Amino acid sequence: MIMKRHTLLLLLLTSIALQAEDIPAGYYDAIEGLTDSVLKSQLSTIIYGGERYEYGTTTYHSSNHPPEWVKGDLKAYGTWQAFPLTDRREDGSIWDMYTNSVRYYPCKQGESGCSLNIEHCLPKSWWGWNKNDTREGSLLAYRDLWHLNPSDAQANSSKSNYPPGHVVKGDKFDNGSFRMDSKAKSQYGYICFEPAAEYRGDFARAYFYVATAYQNIEWDSTYITTGYITPDLSRFFSEAITQVLLDWHRADPVSTKEICRAEQISSIQHNRNPYIDYPELVEYIWGNKKGVSVSLSDLTCTAGTAYCPEYIPAAPTEHLYDTLLAFPALTKETVNAVPNCFASDKIQSNGTASITMGTSATDGYLAFSSLNLQDTAILTFRASIYNTAETMQLDVYTGNTLLHSIYDTAQLNTRNEIRYQVAIPAGTDSITVVSVGGSTKTRACMQELYLLKAKEVGQSTKYEVPSDKVPSDKVPSDKAEKYLQNGVLYLRHSGNTYDSMGRIIRN
């Protein structure tokens, strides 16, 4: 297996590295010769437990040994700090199995982006999760990355707690990737969902994992009554759902994406998904090899068979900029905390990294005054159509003059996040960015905003920091060398170039 290292920037500029793990020696040996429910129970014993990151963004973590919370630990991350390792494409975009929309993680590490949720692939309501739940294993399942994914908020909301199925019409929801049948059109008599063909096996193996790891949780009887699950531990899912999952598992074999994701999750949680490592095990428990004793030497192992490239941003263009305004985490609070900067009361913060430009039927706006620009500058930001809107329009004003309008329309519920650059003329004293439309159907979501000015030749300076430190992911120093490429801000010091999350990309 090719071993690789990933670095995350902590809030206090402390770096740690996660190293992809091999399957521990003897990890699966105890399943040799087992069959059916005994095999499933032994797998449950093997994969249950391990480390868990806090759900969301809070920097805590829990462990079975000991079970108490630890604050300030170097492994103390939330789900959104894991996703850039587990669910990022080579180009840096978010790997979202619920939509074709192209979006990016916020520059503030560990925060959710515009129109995104953390989705439990297998709904948490099926085991009756709530914040006061003290049942053994329930909290582990709630925070388990093996069935948590970054997801489009609209698709996630539509999916709700409905089961998987072979979708016929897609009349309930369809965004070109994730589809749902209404109860009236479904062949099962209940609402069901179906992801794109390339992800169906991913979903199936996540469902089989949860059904195995947490089989001893007291599952909500409501979903036994509805016929989604069964108290029979050897089957767990209803016959209809089991068949759907088997179909998906067989039609969509384990992919490079899934293997690489498994490596990262294993390095975080220190447990495995046996149905990714040994896909044939599914057949021994639910499929055409029930009653057959397992022989590990006869099974094909996928672990370590894929090349997993590390995400490295493209090298920036050689152009130096001074930062006049910097909001790597763009919220109402961060804007209003800066003198002569104002976010209207109709702007909503999405977590601590992005904003929705308006509420109800009222537009929102950002205003920056007393700029006194002596030279031309560039206003750069990322924006997308809000997850329930159909269009967005952002108007950029200098003083009372409309300088530039940005307009975009959702195509089949696809809302790509785009990096925009607007040239601001010399002599400008104020800039206002307005979301136009006054409607929930016309609304923008924004994150990461900078106002940059080209440096004069020979006037660049360096960070005055120790060589073992990296630039902060908060507001950059005005003494830093800065580069702009496609609206992305890069930092340089001591001969190295970093992205805004502090990762070195060139030296």
Image (spheres, helix red, strand yellow):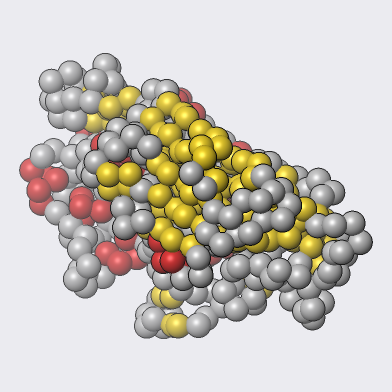
Q: Is residue 37 above or below residue 62?
A: above
Q: Residue at x 67, y 44 (%)?
A: 425
Q: Is residue 5 visible?
A: no
Q: Position of residue 215 (x, y in %)?
A: 27, 56
Q: Residue at x 48, y 49 (%)?
A: 432
Q: Is residue 256 above or below residue 412?
A: below
Total numbered labels: 0
Q: Is residue 238 above or below residue 319?
A: above
**Relative side of 8 to 316, left or right:** left
Q: Residue at x 41, y 34 (%)?
A: 392
Q: Nearer the viewer, residue 428 or 405?
A: 428
Q: Nearer the viewer, residue 319 or 467?
A: 319
Q: Is residue 291 above or below residue 456?
A: above
* Quadrant in the rendering for residue 60: bottom left
Q: Position of residue 294 (x, y in %)?
A: 46, 45
**Relative side of 135 to 200, left or right:** left
Q: Nearer the viewer, residue 237 or 167?
A: 167
Q: Quadrant of the C terminus?
A: bottom right
Q: Residue at x 33, y 44 (%)?
A: 363
Q: Is residue 60 visible?
A: yes
* Quadrant in the rendering for residue 50: bottom left
**Relative side of 321 to 12, left or right:** right
| Residue at the extreme right of the image, as rendered | 458
Q: Position of residue 364 (x, y in %)?
A: 36, 48
Q: Nearer the viewer, residue 194 or 342?
A: 342
* Quadrant in the rendering for residue 469: bottom right
**Relative side of 75 to 228, left or right:** right
